[in-house]
Amino acid sequence: MARKPLMAGNWKMNLNHVEAVGLLQKLTWTLEDKKHDPDKSEVVVLPPFTDLRTVQTLVDGDRLEIGYGAQDVSAFDNGAYTGDISADMLVKLGCRYVVVGHSERRRFHGEDDNIVNAKTLKAVSRGMVPIVCVGERLAVREQFRHVPDTLHHVEGALVGLTSDQVANMVIAYEPVWAIGTGRVATPEDAQEVCTAIRGWIRERHGGEVSDRIRILYGGSVNARNVAALMAQSDIDGCLVGAASLKVDEFSAIARFYEMPVI
């Protein structure tokens, strides 16, 4: 079964709503100018919460062929949770995707597998597609425990999900030591873990589900390494950080299919 590649740009805590307009417009123009084929890769941006209404207005008003989503979601529906943003709020803003369990949330906000699971279930219950992030720290990689460690987090995130729900979600493998460091897993390193994730899905949910679910790689992805990463059979796209703030770079990543594998 063919899986449509997904290139998701995580803006993190960057760009106010005015800057978001400029970047999104320039990205749209660049993709059109370079004749990006939306059938060959789906392009999604993940802005800060404060930019979402602006992005929604621009995407809907100009009928842009760019998707968008949020960088996090609350595990709660509503109430006295200062600073939280509920799934229903995101749905009202037209968000199709939401990142769950990013390593920066785990590190700086103490999110464990139970919280990640609760947020995943909440996103799915409201019809959004969670992009569930998993990946090992450098010490784990050096001890060659990266595969079981990552699968442990996958298992924790997916508790209580049906096979149909799993098939429609996205898992992003992001080795923590490669995020924002300039270091990137080799295509073979990334493929090893993504293959293991797909195999875990197959064992528990069957071949049809494992064939449908999209598994991304994230961690210092750029226009120079994306083609080799995407040449791997179990990598279905990329979760892009810093490079997604550079229009020419991100548009080139979205057009990975034009690049030779180096």
Image: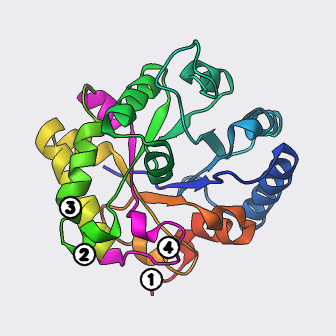
Residue hosting label 4: 226
Between the C-alphas of marks 4 and 2, the distance is 24 Å
Left or right? Give the position of 236 relative to 65: left
Mark 1 or mark 4, earlier in chain? 4
Residue 204 in picture, x, y percent from top left: 14, 38
Q: Is residue 178 magenta?
A: yes
Between the C-alphas of marks 2 and 3, the distance is 12 Å
Residue hosting label 3: 147
Quick one: 48 or 206, which is closer to the camera?
Answer: 48
Classify mark 2: residues with Cα within 10 Å, few (<14), some (14-19) or many (20+): few
Residue 38 in picture, x, y percent from top left: 60, 53
Q: On the image, which quarter does residue 87 sit in?
A: top right
**Circle 1 sits in a helix, a strand or a loop, which is it?**
loop
Residue hosting label 2: 142
Between the C-alphas of marks 1 and 3, the distance is 26 Å
- The structure residue drawn at horizontal position 29% and vertical position 29%, both measured from the top left corner, is 164
The range drawn in magenta is: 162-188
